[in-house]
Amino acid sequence: MLNYSFAFGQDIAKSAVVFGSQPVHAAYAVWPIALAGGLIPNVAYSLWLLTKNRTWSLFRSAAPDLWRSSLMGVLWMGAFALYGMSATYLGALGTSVGWGLLQIFMIMTATMAGVLTGEWKHAGTLQRCCWAQASQV
């Protein structure tokens, strides 16, 4: 849905250019509106679940968790900022070719990070275990 917001929010980007923004930075005017569409229901639902399940006490965050989640947010938003600028340079193909490239690089980066950190180190034995259990049922 973010790409739809970007694709169909080009009138907002054009208005930003009229008010003095550089064309390559005009996509920044679209992101707050597009992201608010997901933020509002996600925050509301999360708050409702935390209250319903009485799980607020689980949020005694340790510094590494706060640092990592903040870094993830900065990197994620940075990727979308670069996508918005790059889509401008691609012109009419920006929202199709640019979105595909963004997805490809996100998947490749996540896969390489998983390989380098050993994220799937024990996945092979777990997978064999689960298949063995499934075949016995």
Image (cartoon, helix red, strand yellow):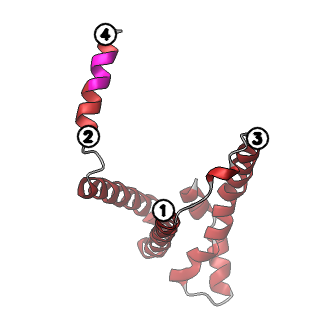
How crowded pointer 1 is (Cα within 10 Å; few <14, some 14-19, many 20+) is rated as many
Amino acid at pointer 1? Thr
Q: Which residue is mark 2?
A: 122
Part of the protein shown in magenta: 129-133
Q: Is 70 in the magenta?
A: no
2 vs 1, front mark: 2
Inter-mark Cα distance, 3 to 4: 39 Å
Residue contact at pointers 4 and 2, CB within 8 angstroms: no
Residue at image location 67% in from the left, 73% down from the top: 12
Q: Position of residue 118 (x, y in %)?
A: 26, 52
Amino acid at pointer 4? Gln
Residue contact at pointers 3 and 4, CB within 8 angstroms: no
Q: Earlier in the sequence, mark 1 or mark 3?
A: 3
Q: Earlier in the sequence, mark 1 or mark 4?
A: 1
Q: Earlier in the sequence, mark 4 or mark 2?
A: 2
Residue at image location 34% in from the left, 60% down from the top: 105
Residue at image location 28% in from the left, 30% down from the top: 127
Q: Is residue 16 left or right of residue 133?
A: right
Q: Secondary structure at mark 4?
A: helix
Q: Secondary structure at mark 2?
A: loop
Height in image: 89 above or below 46?
Answer: below
Height in image: 50 above or below 97?
Answer: above
- Which dot marks residue 136? 4
The quarter of the displayed image where residue 102 is located: bottom left
- Which dot marks residue 95? 1
Q: Position of residue 124 (x, y in %)?
A: 23, 35
- Which dot marks residue 52? 3
Height in image: 78 above or below 95?
Answer: below
Amino acid at pointer 2? His
Q: Secondary structure at mark 3?
A: helix
